[in-house]
Image (cartoon, rainbow, N blue to C red):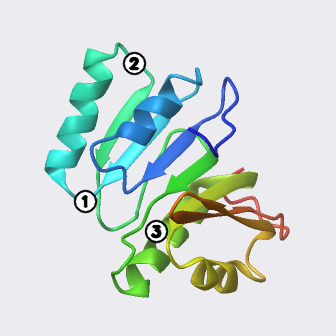
Amino acid sequence: MLSAEIADGDNVLDMGCGCGSVALAAASQTSGMVFGVDSNSRAVACLEEGAKLNGLENVRAIWNADGNLELPVAIDIALANPPYYGADAIAQHFVETCLSVLRVGGALLVVTKKPNWYEASFHGALEDVVTFEAGKYWVVCARKPNFGQSVGT
């Protein structure tokens, strides 16, 4: 976890978790809940097994493709690694799903090869947008602002 600053007690969402490497690393840094979401049932099973093998009881693997997550807690940090070469509709779905469960002031971090698309998408919807290079990829970070709404708080 070179880019995400996860504090003890933070609730974390790993959107598009794949086999769960990022979710497992996050779970080892917090006593909060870590939710790994993926549309591939085999990926979700890998996350479940990884949590079991590592004794991480704060991990919940969720098989979901529609983005309607009913989480028991608001999310402090949402991490996403959408497909790089897929349609922007998939990336948009990831962002919208993360924002639907992120608390006001919570952080969204997206790993991408197309930072310009995220910067443009975040403009006006998120605040404190920062982009930095991380190896061959980019990380675009932003915070969910308070627009007078209590969604996700």
In the image, taking residue 44 as reference, residue 15 lies left or right, namely right
Q: Amino acid at mark 3?
A: Phe
Q: Amino acid at mark 2?
A: Leu
The residue under label 3 is: 94
Measured as percent of width and height from the top left, residue 5 is found at 69, 38
Task: Find the distance from the CA under tag 1 to the CA under tag 3.
Answer: 11 Å
Residue ID at (45%, 23%): 58
Q: Which mark is residue 9?
A: none
Task: Find the distance from the CA under tag 1 to the CA under tag 2.
Answer: 22 Å
Looking at the picture, tell me which residue is in the foreground, 106 or 70. Answer: 106
Residue ID at (43%, 38%): 23
- SS of the residue under disc 3: helix
Between disc 1 and disc 3, whose residue precedes?
A: 1
Measured as percent of width and height from the top left, residue 78 is found at 57, 52
Between disc 3 and disc 2, whose residue precedes?
A: 2
In the image, taking residue 116 as reference, residue 46 lies left or right, namely left
Q: Which mark is residue 39?
A: 1
Furthest-top residue in this view: 55
Quadrant of the snapshot with the N terminus: top right
Measured as percent of width and height from the top left, residue 19 is found at 27, 43
Q: Amino acid at mark 1?
A: Ser
- SS of the residue under disc 2: loop
Furthest-front residue in this view: 135
- Say few, some or many: other residues with alpha carbon within 10 Å of mark 3 (under 14 / 14 to 19 / 20 or more): many
Q: Is residue 97 above or below residue 57?
A: below
Between disc 1 and disc 2, whose residue precedes?
A: 1
In the image, taking residue 43 as reference, residue 87 lies left or right, namely right
Looking at the picture, tell me which residue is in the foreground, 148 or 33. Answer: 33
Task: Find the distance from the CA under tag 3 to the CA under tag 2.
Answer: 25 Å
The residue under label 2 is: 56
Measured as percent of width and height from the top left, residue 125 is found at 73, 77
- SS of the residue under disc 1: loop
